[in-house]
Amino acid sequence: MRATVLTSVPGRVEIADVPVDAPGPGEVLVRTAACGLCHSDLLPVTGALSPPVPLVLGHEAAGDVEAVGPGVVDFAPGDRVVACMSQYCGTCGACARGETTLCERRDRPPLVREAGRAPRLGTADAPVGQWLNIAGMAERFLVHERAVVKVAPSLPVDVAALLGCAVLTGFGTVVNAARLAPGETIAVVGCGGVGLAAVATARMAGAARIIAVDPAAGALELAATLGATDLIDPAGTDAVKAVRTMTGGVDHAVEAIGRPDTMRQVVDMVRPGGSSYLVGLAGPDVEMSINPFRTVWYQRTIRGVLMGANQFRRDIPRIAALYLAGRLPIDRLISAHIDLDDAPAALDELRTGATGRSVVTF
């Protein structure tokens, strides 16, 4: 099959032919219909993370089940599915608490193949890795059954793909982590796919004021169409001061970029007793500082949120239903549909902070 392959870290991806195995016990083979390009895909490309290479990129994928392995009972050929990196074992302590995003075995057998078995991708002599255990930017992806969820076949495949990461993260941050109540206020710093999904979800949830912060005019315009009530370009404005002048401090503030300076800003944007949510994924060596006096004195909460603190088999069908009912217009996040051959150039463009989401369609 043809796939988007990274051969060095840092490096540039190329399109190459990669063998894919038949599904083993508990696995499903999916013919890819669409895969979104996410900033997280840049982490190995830029060297912020250093997974083994070669590696097939892509994790925001959807498609139709082509074959299932022994023991799979929840899926059958023809099912429309969405992949999610938050695969879970269902039996560890985190899963027992309902925190499946934090599954203690998400990177271990049986969710990934044991050493000594034939790899899912490549050959025994030349294995190829799966970025975030998905490797969805390819004509097919082979994953454990607990990395996918069924969705309605009427759901457009490009929208379905975004549900597995960007939309799930933005939606979950507002609904699962912030538990935003009608009439509350929220600031969203960074209006890429995740931030825009958070804006749209906050509007649906009844936020009284939604403040979008981004230096890109196109991103702010899109945020306004999704429900942002106020727009701030931080290039010429003190964003913290502007938010506090508007509201006295918001109830919730979301950082969806992954930079220390903007993380500090959202901490200072919230009212006394308010909460900030650090959603953007920075490199593992990145550090940030906060003012502990103000944090304690104003009793502010700072929470890291991974993938919207999701239970994706519950949340993704719920989001799909809201979209199909016309209540969550997440299709507006899609800025371009591209072919697989265009993915390397699109990933290069993504480094510049492109607005919206490009989606590879097959």
Image: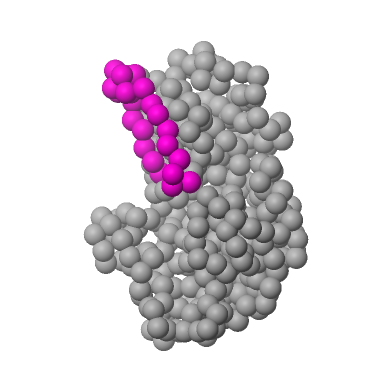
The percent position of residue 70, horizontal first and vertical second, equals: 41, 86
Q: Nearer the viewer, residue 180 or 169?
A: 169
* 32 vs 85: above or below: below
Q: Position of residue 346 (x, y in %)?
A: 72, 54
User: Given the current orientation, which residue lies at the most extreme top position?
Assistant: 245
- Please say whether residue 295 is one of the residues in the magenta stretch: yes
Instruction: Relative to 262, say whether 125 is above or below.
Output: below
Question: Which image quarter holds the N terminus?
Answer: bottom right
Q: Quadrant of residue 139?
A: bottom right
At 44% from the left and 54% from the top, the residue drawn is 315
Image-quadrant location for residue 5 = bottom right
Q: In the rendered view, would you say 200 is above or below 310?
A: above
**Quarter-of-image position of residue 12:** bottom right
Q: Residue at x 66, y 46 (%)?
A: 351
Inspect the magenta stretch and tell me whether residue 287 lies in it. Answer: yes
Name the side, left or right, on which 202 lies relative to 11: left
Q: In the picture provided, is 225 more to the left or to the right than 144?
A: right
Res 323 visible: no
In the rendered image, the vertical position of residue 117 relative to residue 2, given as above or below: below
* Residue 78 visible here: yes
Q: Residue at x 52, y 25 (%)?
A: 209
Q: Is residue 52 left or right of residue 355?
A: left
Relative image position of residue 217 (x, y in whole percent): 71, 31
| Residue bounds of the magenta highlight | 283-305
Which one is in front, 116 or 236? 116
Total numbered labels placed on residues in the image: 0
Residue 197 in the image: state x and y as whole percent.
56, 43
Identify the residue shown where x is 42% and y is 37%: 287
Query: Which quadrant of the rendered structure holds the C terminus?
Result: bottom right
